[in-house]
């Protein structure tokens, strides 16, 4: 469960940091509105991994759409293109 606390509580930042746990960030408010979040490093790493997976899925979906619209490449053509790229030719 996240903790919501005013940014002025950072005067005693040790107390604020004690509230931060995995899966339970602390949200800091300024004038009653969300301004910042403090989260455990494990949560931050998991968030970055999730962003990377979303980006990968978007790229894969774009490739599938392209293949459906423009046609699929045969296995032989793929091997040929990969060999050409490996040897510095396009």
Image (spheres, rainbow, N blue to C red):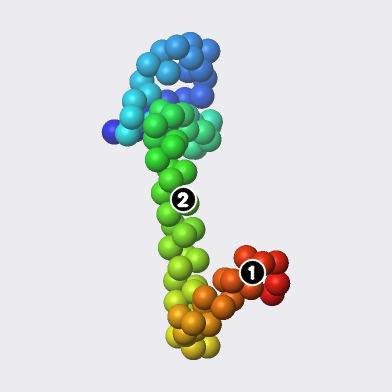
Horizontal arrangement in the rendering, residue 30 relative to residue 47 (left or right) = right
Query: What residue lies at 44% left-to-right and 37% top-to-bottom?
Result: 45
Q: Report the residue marked by disc 2.
A: 51
Of helix, strand and loop, which one carries label 2?
A: helix
- On the image, numbered disc 1 is attached to which residue? 85
Residue 69 in view in this figure: no
Q: For the residues marked 1 and 2, what is the alpha-carbon distance in whole angstroms?
A: 29 Å
- Helix, strand or loop at mark 1: helix
The N terminus sits in image quarter: top left
Q: Is residue 9 above or below residue 50?
A: above
Q: Quadrant of the C terminus?
A: bottom right
Spot the residue most to the right: 89
Indicate left or right for 17 with 90 as reference.
left
Q: 60 or 33, which is in the foreground?
A: 60
Determine the residue positioned at 47% across, 51% down: 52
Q: Position of residue 12 (x, y in %)?
A: 48, 11
Front-lying residue, 68 or 34: 68
The residue located at (70%, 72%) in the rendering is 89
Is residue 53 in view from this perspective?
A: yes
Mark 2 surroundings: few (<14), some (14-19) or many (≥20) residues within 10 A: few
Q: Earlier in the sequence, mark 1 or mark 2?
A: 2
Q: Which mark is residue 59?
A: none
């Amino acid at each position: 469960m996240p903790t919501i606390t005013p940014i002025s509580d950072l005067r005693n930042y040790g107390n604020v940091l004690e509230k931060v746990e995995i899966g339970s960030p602390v949200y800091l408010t300024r004038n009653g509105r969300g301004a910042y979040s403090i989260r455990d490093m494990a949560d931050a790493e998991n968030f970055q991994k999730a962003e990377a997976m979303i980006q990968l899925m978007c790229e894969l979906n774009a490739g599938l759409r392209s293949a459906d619209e423009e046609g699929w490449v045969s296995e032989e053509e793929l091997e040929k293109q990969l060999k050409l790229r490996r040897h510095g030719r396009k």
